[in-house]
Image (spheres, rainbow, N blue to C red):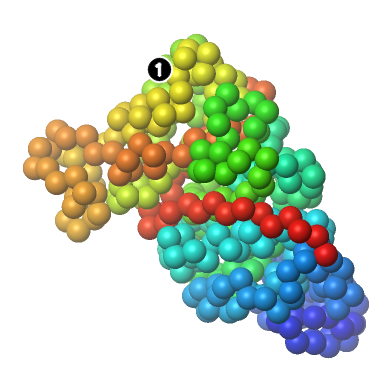
């Protein structure tokens, strides 16, 4: 069977299983079977965008392979994407290669970080992205394959093979696929892209370098302060990278029920950010006890000799990103970041072929 890979033709004799065995042995997969990226399939995938196939969107570190539109399409085929997903994938790559995202660190660190893709705007409904029940889980082709294509790009263009250039000690399941949409219809505040200066009717992609989601379970409190106190306690753990660095971001994905309760109490998104900034903190004495001292960034940004001082997880309240997603249930999610990364939001170019 013939296929296309890295803009060159790769000839493999045999059937679907033979092609997959070959690609797996070459380190070109995520360990799961892939769709063989034949020339016809890649051409069909390219029909989802008007961008030239040879246009480079940037390079993917640490190997620094050129992310041309064609190579994005190749990996999209392998992941099982539809052509309509190409604009989201292209935007995700454009966001990841921005300097502030620090894709080199995200793709090569020992930390369990993965790029989370968050999609906003009309394209969410157009391509049927999940923003409700099981938003971080299985069941939606768009979420699963877009997130998977991002991972394949980090492997095949960035050289992110486990134990080689990807040095993650443990990793996490989001390194297979990590893509959600925001539940804008249940968000009582401005959605993420509007917070960041885009119009509500624009489609955007945000990438964040974060750990796996950790549950914020609060079935009791019926006040904003009560729910947010639970959220702050969940965020303020000593071992996460934000407690070390204090200059990255954290993200809280509020379930619609929690978000609704907080908003009905008259709390704005800014109020939420300030509360979590002020209350998701660790005592300096505790940080010193586990050796988080010396040259760690928080020490330079928050100089103090008071061992009772409470050290925040982020530099500013604005670094607490607030999103609303998920279905019914009094659950939310806390996502710590790699620390040495900043989230990036870019507009989706929805021009068709």
Examine the rendering and report whether any part of residue 331 can be seen: no
The residue that label 1 is drawn on is 225
Q: Is residue 266 left or right of residue 241?
A: right
Residue 200 coordinates in the image, percent (x, y): 63, 38
Q: Nearer the viewer, residue 328 or 18?
A: 328
Query: Which residue is situated farthest in the left direction here?
Result: 305
Secondary element at tag 1: helix
Residue 329 coordinates in the image, percent (x, y): 63, 22
Examine the rendering and report whether any part of residue 209 can be seen: yes
- Say which quarter of the image contains residue 202: top right
Quadrant including the N terminus: bottom right
Residue 303 coordinates in the image, percent (x, y): 14, 46
Quadrant including the C terminus: bottom right
Which residue does the image show at 80% across and 87% down from the upper left? Answer: 9
Q: Is residue 44 left or right of residue 30?
A: right
Residue 293 lies, with reference to residue 262, above or below; the image says below
Which residue does the image show at 35% across and 47% down from the upper left? Answer: 242
Residue 281 lies, with reference to residue 27, above or below; the image says above
């Amino acid at each position: 069977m013939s296929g296309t890979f890295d803009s060159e033709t790769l000839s493999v004799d045999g059937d679907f299983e033979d092609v997959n065995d070959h690609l797996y042995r070459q380190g070109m997969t995520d360990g799961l079977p892939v769709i063989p990226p034949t020339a016809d399939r890649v051409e069909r995938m390219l029909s989802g965008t008007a961008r030239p196939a040879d246009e480079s969107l940037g390079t993917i570190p640490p190997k620094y392979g050129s992310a041309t539109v064609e190579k994005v399409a190749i990996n999209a085929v392998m992941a099982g994407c539809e052509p309509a997903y190409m604009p989201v994938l292209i935007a995700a790559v454009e966001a990841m290669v921005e300097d502030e995202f620090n894709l080199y660190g995200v793709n090569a660190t020992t930390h369990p970080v993965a790029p989370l893709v968050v999609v906003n705007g009309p394209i969410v409904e157009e391509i049927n992205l999940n923003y409700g029940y099981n938003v971080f889980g299985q069941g939606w082709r768009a979420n699963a394959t877009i997130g998977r294509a991002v991972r394949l790009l980090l492997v095949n263009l960035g050289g992110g093979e486990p134990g080689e250039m990807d040095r993650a000690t443990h990793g996490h399941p989001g390194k297979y696929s990590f893509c959600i949409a925001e539940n804008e219809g249940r968000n009582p505040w401005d959605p993420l892209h509007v917070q960041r200066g885009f119009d509500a009717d624009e489609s955007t992609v945000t990438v964040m370098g974060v750990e796996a989601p950790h549950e914020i379970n609060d079935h009791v409190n019926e006040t904003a302060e009560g729910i947010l106190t639970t959220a702050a306690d969940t965020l303020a753990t000593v071992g996460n990278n934000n407690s070390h660095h204090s200059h990255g971001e954290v993200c809280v994905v509020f379930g619609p029920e929690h978000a609704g309760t907080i908003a009905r109490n008259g709390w704005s998104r800014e109020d939420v950010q300030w509360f979590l900034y002020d209350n998701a903190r660790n005592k300096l004495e505790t940080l010193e006890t586990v050796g988080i001292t010396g040259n760690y960034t928080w020490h330079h940004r928050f100089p103090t000799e008071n061992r009772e001082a409470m050290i925040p997880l982020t530099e500013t309240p604005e670094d607490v990103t607030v999103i609303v997603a998920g279905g019914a249930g009094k659950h939310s999610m806390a996502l710590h970041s790699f620390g040495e990364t900043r989230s990036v939001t870019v507009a989706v170019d929805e021009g068709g072929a």
